[in-house]
Amino acid sequence: MAKVARFHSFGGPEVMQIDDVAVGDPGAGEVRIRVGAMGLNRVETMVRSGAYGEVALPSKLGYEAAGIIEALGPGTSGWAVGERVAVLFGLPMDVYGTYGEQILYPADMLVRVPDGMSLAQAAASWMQYGTAYALIDLGQIKAGDHVVINAASSSVGLAAIQIANDHKAVPIAVTRGRGKAGALLAHGAAHVIVSNEEDVPARIREITGGAGAQIAFDAVAGSALAGLLSAMAPRGVVIVYGMLGGYAFEMQLAALMGANLALHGFSANRLIEVPADRARVIAYIERGLASGALTPVIDRTFDLSEIAEAHRYLESNMQFGKIVVITASAEE
C-alpha cells in the first residue's frame, strides 16, 4: 500500500486527505514510479474546488512528479528500473494524478532527471517551463520583444521571465504588491509594474515608448484583460493561460480588430499531445536546464502529509516560485 493524497468531496484545502492505496503493477507501456517530489499547480486547486466540473470521487490530483522507476509494464522499452525520471504534464489527473508515494505513468511521457539535479528541482521544472513555452510556440518570441508577464512571481511567471531573457526579449513583470518587486528584478525582470498601485496599460505604453508590447502572457484574464489588450503593439499576441481574475471579460472589438491582435487561449497539453511537438519542448527545456538559462525557483517544500496546508499556502499567493511536496524518497 502507498500513501496517496486524494479528495473525496469538492471544497477547500481541508478536503485533501491521505489514503492508503494499492497502486498495483504497471500496464502495457507504463512504469511504476517511487515518487520523491511533486510540484503543485494552481489548476489542481481549481479541480479540487469543483471549478472544472464533476469528476469521479474520490479523485487523484497532480500534473508533476519526479522519482525512481521501480517496475516496467509489459512491452515497455527504453527505460530501466532504478532510473531517475520526471513526468510530463497534461494527462488526466483523475487517472494519472501524481500526488502519492507511488504512481503509474505512461513511459512515453517521461524524461530523465540529469545527474546533479535533485528530484525536487525536477518536479519543479516541467509544467512551468512547458507552460511558458507558449511564448515560443504561440508568441514566436524574438530579441527585443517587450513581453508582459502577469502573476509574475508564480512558478510559470518566473519561467516566462527566464525564457524571455533566453531570447533576449524584454520581460515586463506585473505583480499585485510592492513586496515582490525587488525579487522580480533580481530574478531577471527588466521592469516591474505593481498593479495595485499603477495603471498597468499606461505603464506598459510608457515602458515601450508608446509602441505597446509585442507579447502578453496572461494568467489573470477577467476584467483586466481588456486593458491589457489596449496596451499591445499592432499585430501583438496575447496568450491567456489562466483565469485568476475571473472567467469572463468584456471589451470593444475595435481595439482588437484595429490593431490586428491575436488573442489565444492556451492549455499546455497542446504541447505534449503530438510526439514531434513534445520532442521540441523537451529538447528546449533540457538545453535550458543544462546551460542554466532555465533554473527552477523553489519557494517552499511540504511533506506529503501536509498536502492540505500546501494547498492552503498555494492559494494564499504568498509564494515566490514553485511549491514542492516531498516524500521519504526525495533524496534518492
Image (cartoon, rainbow, N blue to C red):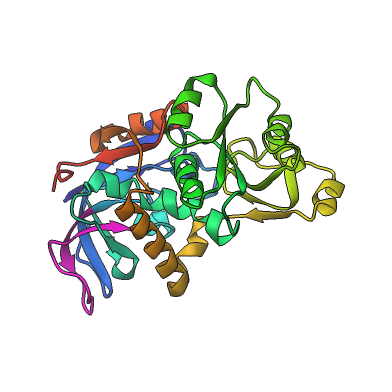
Q: Does 233 sit left or right of 134 as displayed?
A: right
| Residue 4 visible somewhere in the drawing | no
The verdict on residue 80 being magenta is yes
- Residue, x 57% and y 32% (percent of image)? 191
- Where on the picture, by quarter, is residue 310? top left
Q: Does 125 sit left or right of 242 as displayed?
A: left
Residue 221 at x, y percent in the picture: 65, 41
Q: Is residue 205 above or below residue 270?
A: above
| Residue 279 visible somewhere in the drawing | yes
| Nearer to the camera, 276 or 288 | 288
Q: Does 93 sit left or right of 33 as displayed?
A: right
Magenta stretch bounds? 67-87
- Residue, x 33% and y 70% (percent of image)? 108
- Where on the picture, by quarter, is residue 218? top right
- Residue, x 57% and y 52% (percent of image)? 143
Residue 73 at x, y percent in the picture: 21, 72
| Nearer to the camera, 205 or 250 | 205
